[in-house]
Image (cartoon, grey):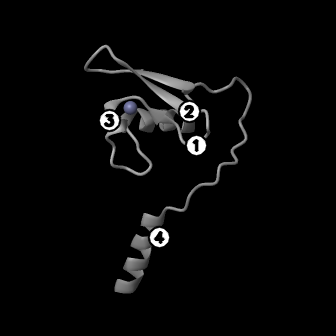
Amino acid sequence: MGTLLKEYRSQSSSRVYEILEPDSGGDPYCTCPGWKFSKDSPRSCKHLVEYHREMQTPQQVNKGVSMPVDVDEPIDTEDVFEKSITECMG
Ligand SMILES: [Zn+2]
């Protein structure tokens, strides 16, 4: 069905939800009901949010090896928007 990327144990039950990467490629998905019934596009859930956060901020820093950072920071559109409003208002 896909490649298992990460497992998250439910806090309210003994179920384990899986973050999976589709064999056909594309965005990873989760097996929890939250994802299934998500109205977001693309679908999301707390596990996927947590997964993406872990991907962005590695918990373990490699000893003595500095990782090259070549990720393009997305422009903070909200900040730009706010700034333009402030300028309009003088
Ligand atoms: Zn989930």
Q: Position of residue 73 (x, y in %)?
A: 59, 55
Outermost residue toward the top in this view: 14
- Label 1 sits on what residue type? Gly
Residue 90 seen: no
Numbered disc in front, either 4 or 1: 1
Q: Is mark 2 within 8 Å of ligand 1?
A: no
| Marks 4 and 1, how far apart at CA | 30 Å
Q: Which residue is mark 4?
A: 80
For the residue marked with disc 3, what is the amino acid?
Answer: Gly
Q: Which residue is tagged 2?
A: 21
Closer to the camera in the image, 36 or 47: 36
- Classify the position of the N terminus by image quarter: top right
What's the amino acid at mark 4? Answer: Val
Q: 10 Å neighbourhood of mark 2: few (<14), some, or many (≥20)?
A: some
Residue wearing tag 1 = 26
| Left or right, residue 44 beside residue 56 | left
Q: Which residue carries the number 3 mark?
A: 34
Q: Is residue 16 above or below residue 71?
A: above
Whether label 3 lies within 8 Å of ligand 1 gets the answer yes
Q: Are dots 1 and 2 in contact, CB under 8 Å?
A: yes
Query: Measuring 34% from the left and 17% from the top, which residue is drawn there?
Result: 15
- Considering only vertical position in the picture, is 19 above or below 15? below
